């Protein structure tokens, strides 16, 4: 039983690494369905955005529009059972409006901590904490 849980955790960790690389780093948002359940519950979704996989794609699209050259770097990742925790950064140039802040042309780093729960190889739930204050300070909007 323990070996099976460890294998599942490792599989989920590999899937999360692929999610970060494919969707967040490379911006292949049309592939969101490969990684996210249609009915995914995002506990951190900004108001007014659609739910499920469509909402995940919308959030990632907003980041990509504001920071079109951004990369996604995993600093730490831990998996246990069906949960994966990721500490990562997005670093890019602020070239589009982002939550009411007009483009500044400044390079900025967004620090993020995520928890995701996997079900059948795809994300079923998501929670995150984003260092919004740190980002706004970098953009001169704090």
Image (cartoon, rainbow, N blue to C red):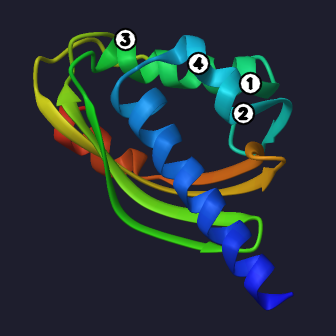
Residue at 76% from the left image edge and 56% from the top image edge = 117
Asked whether disc 4 touches disc 2, contact meaning CB atoms under 8 Å apart, the reply is no
Helix, strand or loop for disc 3: helix
Mark 1 and mark 4 lie on one chain; the one further toward the N terminus is 4
Residue 94 placed where, x, y %?
Answer: 21, 21
Q: Earlier in the sequence, mark 4 or mark 2?
A: 4
- Circles 2 and 1: CB atoms closer than 8 Å: yes
Left or right? Give the position of 25 relative to 34. Answer: left
Asked if disc 3 and disc 1 are in contact, CB closer than 8 Å, the reply is no
Q: Secondary structure at mark 4?
A: helix
Residue contact at pointers 3 and 2, CB within 8 angstroms:
no
CA–CA distance in space, label 3 to label 4:
17 Å
- Residue 65 - label: 3
129 shown above or below 93? below
Location of the C terminus (image quadrant): top left
Write down the residue under mark 2: 36
Question: Disc 3 to disc 1, how far (Cα)?
Answer: 18 Å
Secondary structure, mark 2, is strand
Separation of residues labelled 1 and 4 (CA atoms) = 10 Å
Residue at the far bottom in the pictured view: 2
Name the mark nearer the viewer: 3 or 2: 2
Q: Which residue in the protein does label 1 denote?
A: 53
């Amino acid at each position: 039983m323990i070996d099976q849980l460890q294998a599942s955790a490792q599989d989920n960790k590999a899937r999360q690494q692929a999610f970060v690389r494919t969707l967040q780093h490379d911006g292949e948002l049309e592939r969101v369905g490969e990684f996210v359940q249609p009915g995914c519950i995002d506990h951190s979704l900004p108001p007014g955005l659609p739910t499920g996989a469509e909402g995940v794609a919308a959030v990632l699209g907003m980041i990509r529009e504001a920071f079109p050259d951004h990369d996604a770097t995993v600093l730490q990742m831990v998996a246990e059972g069906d949960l994966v925790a990721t500490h990562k950064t997005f670093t890019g140039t602020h070239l589009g409006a982002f939550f009411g802040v007009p483009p500044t042309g400044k390079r900025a780093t967004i620090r993020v901590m995520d928890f995701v729960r996997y079900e059948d190889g795809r994300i079923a739930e998501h929670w995150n904490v984003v260092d919004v204050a740190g980002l706004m300070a970098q953009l001169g909007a704090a």
